[in-house]
Image (tube, grey):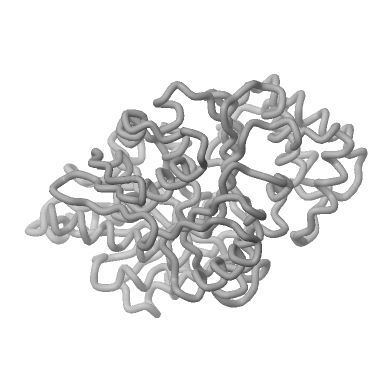
Amino acid sequence: MSTVTQSNIILERLLALHPKRIDLVLDRIERLLAQLGHPEFRLPPVIHVAGTNGKGSTCAFARAILEAQGLRAHVYTSPHLVRFHERIRLAGKLISEEELSDTLQECEIANAGAPITFFEITTAAALLASSRHPADVLILEVGLGGRLDATNVIRRPAVTVITPVGLDHQEFLGPDLVNIAAEKAGIIKPGVPLVVGSQDDRARDVIERTADSLSAPVYFYGQDFFAHVERGRMIYQDENGLLDLPLPKLSGAHQIDNAGTAIAALRHSKRGWADESGIESGLRQVEWPARLQRLTRGPIVALAPEGAEVWLDGGHNPHAAHALAQALADFEERSEKPLYLICGMLKTKDAEGFLTPFRGLARHVTTLTIPGETASRGAGELYDAARKTGLDASPADDLEDAMAQVAGWACGRPGEGAPRVLICGSLHLAGIVLAENG
């Protein structure tokens, strides 16, 4: 059970300030930042990162590489998994409880009860805290979209980054890839270098046109920089040369792309942030929970069949599922194990689109309602979606029941050996797993 802290109490109050449907504008946060004395003008150089998938991992790679060089990095990401403090990292350390509660309260007083979203006021708090601590760089992750996201108050970042764009949050960003890419491209600034991860051609065209219109130098994955695996090493190449690097600590082929995008951002920022030894060390040391994370101990792992691998991933849209399925297919090629999914998802997510890439790969899907989450799909509803995709499935009462069901299915097929279990479908579910599993 989580401890009630002063920051928890304030965060609950802030949630009530603007309870209606999210409406994306910059007016509210600009007003609040003005009341706070414009902390956004007193920040270290900013790496601004947008995208549908991979932006959190790209931020994690950038931070690890910078810190391996002895540089001080502030980081603002969202959402958190277990504690809100995870969102704000100041010069290498998570924000303290005292500073978080004091800063939130300061923002609450300055806002004076005016309408504002939870993300806007907490972003203002993150910028205010970041402005008060010396650092060499601020890594700033977009929350939703880009053009009207609360983080898009930075007038001239050192570099902007757009990771792969896919279908997600269509109710806010538009119905198709072109609309969504246009919103992500809203972070591009005149003359500021832009690094673009692997993209669908439709998204790439929108991003390229926007960059051209703003005279922003643009560097595309697969054209201006490359990253791939060769003989157990990661090879990165751009106009400045080739780097022979260790494989990143984060699993999956998609993390090679994310690492390459982070390296390109640091190399093209023109600030000398890409020391080769720092890149090597950063790739080895990077941490980013719930992104194809192997769980090796804890109460939930103890419920798994003997010898099972238990993995956790918070991906929740079709684009993320394709990357995840490919990573698991690669695992299967190296070490054959029957794959079982435990899946929970929010009502706003495309369940069939998420589950379809696992057809022919997963033996069974156990569905559950995300505990304590009112916006969760019901286990039965998610079961129906899984069956529609052609997957064998069953609903579970909770995580414990889900793992017990997996154990039952696996024990019923003794000739197949110990299974590989993936808990997936939601960052909310991933956070609960991390909290409950210690």
Residue 185 lies, in percent from the top left, at 61, 62
Q: Is residue 369 visible?
A: no
Q: Is residue 313 left or right of residue 99?
A: left
Q: Is residue 270 visible?
A: yes
Residue found at the far left of this picture: 415
Asked which quadrant contains residue 276, the reply is top left
- Label count reads 0
Which residue is at the front of the view, 397 or 367?
367
- Which quadrant: the N terminus? top right
Asked which quadrant contains residue 23, the reply is bottom right
Q: Is residue 404 left or right of residue 112?
A: left
Which residue is at the front of the view, 265 or 325?
265
Residue 320 lies, in percent from the top left, at 42, 61
Q: Identify the residue at image location x=85%, y=33%.
A: 36
Q: Identify the residue at image location x=72%, y=58%.
A: 148
Residue 288 lies, in percent from the top left, at 42, 39
Q: Is residue 300 left or right of residue 22?
A: left
Which residue is at the front of the view, 78 or 403?
78
Q: Identify the residue at image location x=85%, y=41%.
A: 32
Q: Is residue 377 left or right of residue 399?
A: right
- Which quadrant: the C terminus? top left
Residue 366 lies, in percent from the top left, at 36, 61
